[in-house]
Amino acid sequence: MNASKFFKSFRYAVAGIVTATKEQNLRFHLLSAVIVLLAGIFTGLNMIEWLIIILVIVLVIGAEMVNTAIERVVDLASPEIHPLAKQAKDIAAGAVLVFAMASVIIGLLIFLPKWL
Ligand SMILES: Nc1ncnc2c1ncn2[C@@H]1O[C@H](COP(=O)(O)OP(=O)(O)OP(=O)(O)O)[C@@H](O)[C@H]1O
């Protein structure tokens, strides 16, 4: 593989992450992630629990980034109101909600027994 092409792609990916962090929703997920990580440090988690928590955080943030990308493409492809544009945005947002709800349940299952 061409190294300069690889590093160029890497730079574009980093630029994408920086752009995404300007989104209000992603900032909310990042703040939640910091709070959960701090809770994990103060509560004391084992290796498996840390792996699950980190995996869940990354999945929610990744889903939110894909959702943001879909929103951009929909806005580009359909600046006017269209039922399919609405469906695409709402389904993408729904996917984030599914991940977020699962992450809350997983977080509660890990933290609650330790706190109670
Ligand atoms: N082109 C469109 N046609 C039909 N409905 C749309 C269209 N664009 C947005 N919508 C509807 O309006 C809602 C809000 O869309 P909007 O793009 O303002 O915010 P969002 O998708 O929640 O993203 P953001 O994070 O930018 O606020 C969408 O979830 C969708 O239901």
Image (cartoon, grey):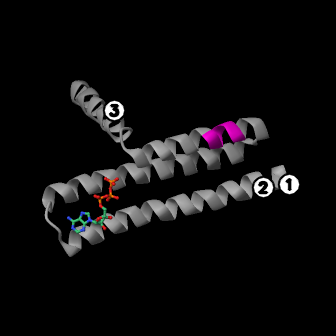
Q: Are marks 2 and 1 in contact (CB under 8 Å)?
A: yes
Residue 44 seen in the figure: no
**N-term-proximal mark, 3 vs 2:** 3
**N-term-proximal mark, 3 vs 1:** 3
Is 84 located above or below residue 54 in the figure?
A: below
Q: Specify the amino acid type for callout 1.
A: Leu
Magenta-highlighted residues: 35-39
Main secondary structure of the magenta stretch: helix
Q: Would you call the spot at circle 2 few (<14 residues within 10 Å), some (14-19), or many (20 or more)? A: few
Q: Specify the amino acid type for callout 3.
A: Val
Where disc 1 sits, the SS reads loop
Q: Which residue is mark 2?
A: 112
Disc marking residue 116: 1
Where disc 2 sits, the SS reads helix
CA–CA distance in space, label 3 to label 2: 36 Å
Judged left or right of residue 60, residue 90 is: left
CA–CA distance in space, label 2 to label 1: 6 Å
Q: Which residue is mark 3?
A: 14
Residue 38 occupies which quadrant of the picture? top right
Q: At 55% across and 47% down in the image, what residue appears? A: 57
Give the image location of residue 107, x and y in percent.
67, 54
Residue 5 occupies which quadrant of the picture? top left
